Each structure stands twice: as C-alpha cells, then as structure tokens.
C-alpha cells in the first residue's frame, strides 16, 4: 500500500512522446524495464566502480553497483510506503552516464569538454535516455516518464536556484539544459521521495562495498577498520557473538552489520520526518524544499570519518594514483584523436558527424562516443589507434582507478 505522499503511477506527468498505457505494467515498471534492456545498461558490466573492470572477478563494476543500489532502493521504498518501481528505475539509471574509468575518466572528459559545454555523468545519463539510445521506431532515447527523468536529474537535490542560475559551476551542463528545455524538470526544486531514496541507496551501497573491495584488494585490513566508528563496533559485536570465526565470514558478518546500521538509520530519520507531517501528495514532498531521506547528523559525521579513511587509504593509494594517471592519458589521447579524425569512429557515429556544424557539435559527438566506451574497449582502442598496431602497445594495467 502506497502512502499518500508516494508517487502514484496513475498520476504520472507522462512522457515527452505520448504512448498508449500498458495493460499489465505501470509507467514506472516500463521505465525500469527499458533501462535494464538498454545498451548503456549492459555496458556498465565493463565499467569501473573503483578498480579497473578486468582486475578481479570479485570487485564491483558499475553494473553490480547499480544492481545493489536498486536493491537498497526497493527495500527502503517498500518500508516507507513509497513507489518501489520508481525508486528502482532511478537507481538503475543513475550511473548510465559514467564514462570509462569511473570518476577519473569523468574528470578527464570534464576538462576536455570545458570549452564545449562541459561534461557531467548525471547530465550524460539524461542524454543517453533521451537521445543516444536509438532502438525505437517512434523516438530517440527510452522515452521515460517525467518522474524518472526528474529523479535522474535531481536525486542529489536542486540543480538551480529559483532564478534558474546553476548551483554548481557557471552554466548547466549542455546535456541537462537540452533535456530540461524539452521537458521542464523543475530544476530549482527537490525531487520526489523516491528519487531521494535512490540517492541515499547509492551512498549506502558504495559505503558498504568500497569497504569490502578495499579489504579484498589489501589496501587496508580489518584491524584498520577496528579503529573507525561504525565498522569498529560491528567487528566487536561479531567477535563477541562468534569468537574465532573464520576470517572471511567474520568480514562478511561485520560489514553486513555496517550495512544494516545505515539502512536502519535512514528509516528512522525518514519515519521521524514523515510521521508528523501532513502530506497528501508527492508534490507535497517537493514543496517541503528540504531533504527528507537522509542520514542522521550523528551517522553522517561517522560516515565522513570512514570516507576520509577510504580517501586516504584507497582512492589515493599509490597504486590507485598511478592508475588514475595512466587511464587519464588514455582519455586525453582518444578525445583529440577523434576530434582530428572523426572518420576513425564507427559508421553510425560518422552519420552524426556529417550533420554536425562547428567544433562544439563535433566535440559533443566525440564525448558521447568516448563516454560510452567500456574500460576494456577504451584500452583496446588506445592500444590500436594511439600506440599503433604491430608496434609498441600500452603497458599492462596493474592498479586501480578510484572514486573521489
């Protein structure tokens, strides 16, 4: 049973291109299914989360991360009486716009695109679902509902002030501006509770799995985590309940408790905020103009300690920093190469190039192409096109590419 302030599927604001209503799926279930079946979603299998995709079978990729985020989002939404289908759709789509090599690749593309309207992975996700997926006869993109597009654009909060001025940067990323011009996403306001759930589910998932992947990589140990808030008490509880537990089971039991602490904290805060409020619609959530779905102040402070630990010991570990430099060079080499020789791109991209007028239009096509690459394809193309077939190839990848 949905709460009154949940997003009701029958009240959806619709799609940019009108379609007949499905007889067996809600609009948000259709959004979810289209995202799962998209080419961009499949490519997440071979895109970095923290470590380069081919470094190990157990490290997270963007695909496994997105699935984990969707699972957390469904759990939270269901417990709060929100629309689980919408929360899941936004969660599954939230990383579609990431380029190869994670945030390292994004930093490189952002610098390369500075003169051409910028690059932002959230905005690029919108560009993918509104333009770059080209499978349907009647429209480009996936023709998602307004509510899902709003969630992709604003799951982290408002993007502009009331006057339309961007809250970050000097201008809106062009991909976001173009989408908003076609289908006003009300960028100055907060998004639905379901979008906020997707955002906090992202935080929960990466806080949990970055600890797990960091331990597996050997960049830090369980003993290090015993000194931190949240993780330390979790390990202590496991040791008390299961003395002498085998190390891998001990690790799993402790980190699942860390996961539970975060989920329960969010549910408690949301329940406290939503309980006394008189909210009769999803719009009432937006009109509150504050974030309803969040961590408590205490837990947020403790998570900041953990994030600082991860920043120092994992994201800026020497091996990771070395890898960041290496993959940055890959993006920095490929982008100007395709700008100078767009005929090197596949035929379907050359058609767009032929219609482009000016360097900005060309740069945006090149950014679309490069950002859509998987880690392994970017490395293969760099070895083939930059290092030269039959000649000296790029050195093997041995490190990891970290988050900010």
Image: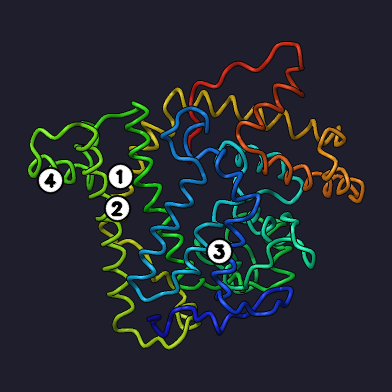
| Residue at the (61%, 38%) spot, across then down | 100
Q: Position of residue 301 (x, y in %)?
A: 29, 53
| Residue at the (52%, 29%) spot, across then down | 54
Mark pair 1, 4: CA separation: 20 Å
Tell me if residue 314 can be seen.
yes
| Residue at the (71%, 45%) spot, across then down | 114
Q: Position of residue 76 (x, y in %)?
A: 36, 65
Q: Position of residue 310 (x, y in %)?
A: 36, 37
Q: Residue 305: give its label.
A: 1
Tell me if residue 172 can be seen.
no
Q: Are marks 1 and 2 in contact (CB under 8 Å)?
A: yes
Given residues 170 and 101, the one toward you in this image is 101
Eyeballing the image, is 232 above or below 17? above
The quarter in which the N terminus is drawn is bottom left
Disc 3 on helix, strand or loop?
helix
Horizontal arrangement in the rendering, residue 41 relative to residue 6 (left or right): right
* Residue count near mark 2 (Cα–Cα under 10 Å), binned few <14, some 14–19, many ≥20: few
Write down the residue under mark 2.
Answer: 301
Disc 4 on helix, strand or loop?
helix
Q: Are marks 1 and 3 in contact (CB under 8 Å)?
A: no
Q: Earlier in the sequence, mark 3 or mark 2?
A: 3
Mark nearer the viewer, 1 or 3: 3
Mark pair 1, 3: CA separation: 35 Å
* Residue count near mark 1 (Cα–Cα under 10 Å), binned few <14, some 14–19, many ≥20: some
Quarter occupied by residue 334: top right
Mark nearer the viewer, 1 or 4: 4
Q: Residue furthest front?
A: 24
Write down the residue under mark 4.
Answer: 237
Q: Position of residue 375 (x, y in %)?
A: 60, 34
Disc 1 on helix, strand or loop?
helix
Q: Residue 32: give its label.
A: 3
């Amino acid at each position: 049973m949905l709460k009154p302030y949940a997003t009701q599927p029958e009240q959806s604001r619709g799609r940019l291109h009108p379609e007949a209503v499905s007889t067996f799926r809600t609009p948000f279930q259709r959004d979810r299914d289209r995202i799962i079946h998209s080419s961009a979603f499949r490519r997440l299998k071979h895109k970095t989360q923290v470590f380069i995709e081919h470094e190990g079978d157990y490290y997270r990729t963007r695909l496994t991360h997105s699935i984990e985020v969707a699972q957390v989002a469904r759990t939270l939404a269901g417990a709060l009486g929100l629309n689980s289908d919408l929360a899941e759709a936004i969660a599954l789509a939230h990383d579609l716009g990431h380029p190869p090599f994670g945030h390292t690749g994004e930093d490189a593309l952002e610098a390369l695109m500075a003169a051409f309207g910028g690059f932002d992975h959230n905005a690029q996700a919108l560009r993918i679902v509104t333009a770059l997926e080209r499978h349907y006869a009647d429209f480009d993109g996936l023709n998602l509902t307004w509510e899902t597009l709003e969630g992709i654009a604003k799951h982290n909060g408002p993007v502009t002030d009331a006057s339309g001025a961007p809250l970050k940067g000097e201008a809106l990323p062009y991909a976001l501006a173009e989408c908003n011009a076609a289908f006003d996403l009300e960028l100055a306001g907060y998004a639905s509770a379901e979008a906020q759930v997707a955002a906090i589910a992202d935080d929960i998932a990466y806080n949990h799995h970055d600890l797990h992947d960091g331990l597996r990589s050997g960049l830090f140990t369980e003993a290090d985590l015993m000194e931190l808030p949240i993780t330390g008490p979790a390990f202590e509880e496991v040791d008390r309940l299961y003395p002498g537990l085998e190390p891998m089971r001990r690790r799993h039991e402790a980190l699942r408790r860390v996961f539970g602490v975060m989920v329960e904290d969010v549910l408690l805060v949301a329940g406290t905020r939503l309980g006394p409020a008189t909210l009769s619609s999803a719009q009432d959530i937006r009109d509150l103009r504050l974030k309803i779905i969040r961590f408590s102040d205490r837990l947020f402070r403790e998570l900041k300690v953990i994030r600082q630990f991860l920043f120092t010991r994992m994201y800026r570990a020497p091996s990771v920093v070395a890898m960041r430099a290496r993959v940055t060079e890959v993006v920095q080499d490929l982008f100007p190469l395709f700008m100078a020789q767009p005929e090197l791109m596949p035929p379907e991209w050359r058609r767009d190039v032929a219609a482009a007028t000016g360097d900005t239009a060309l740069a945006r096509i090149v950014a679309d192409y490069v950002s859509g690459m998987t880690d392994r394809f970017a490395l293969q193309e760099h070895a083939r096109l930059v290092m030269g077939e039959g000649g000296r190839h790029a050195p093997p990848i041995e490190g990891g590419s970290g988050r900010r």
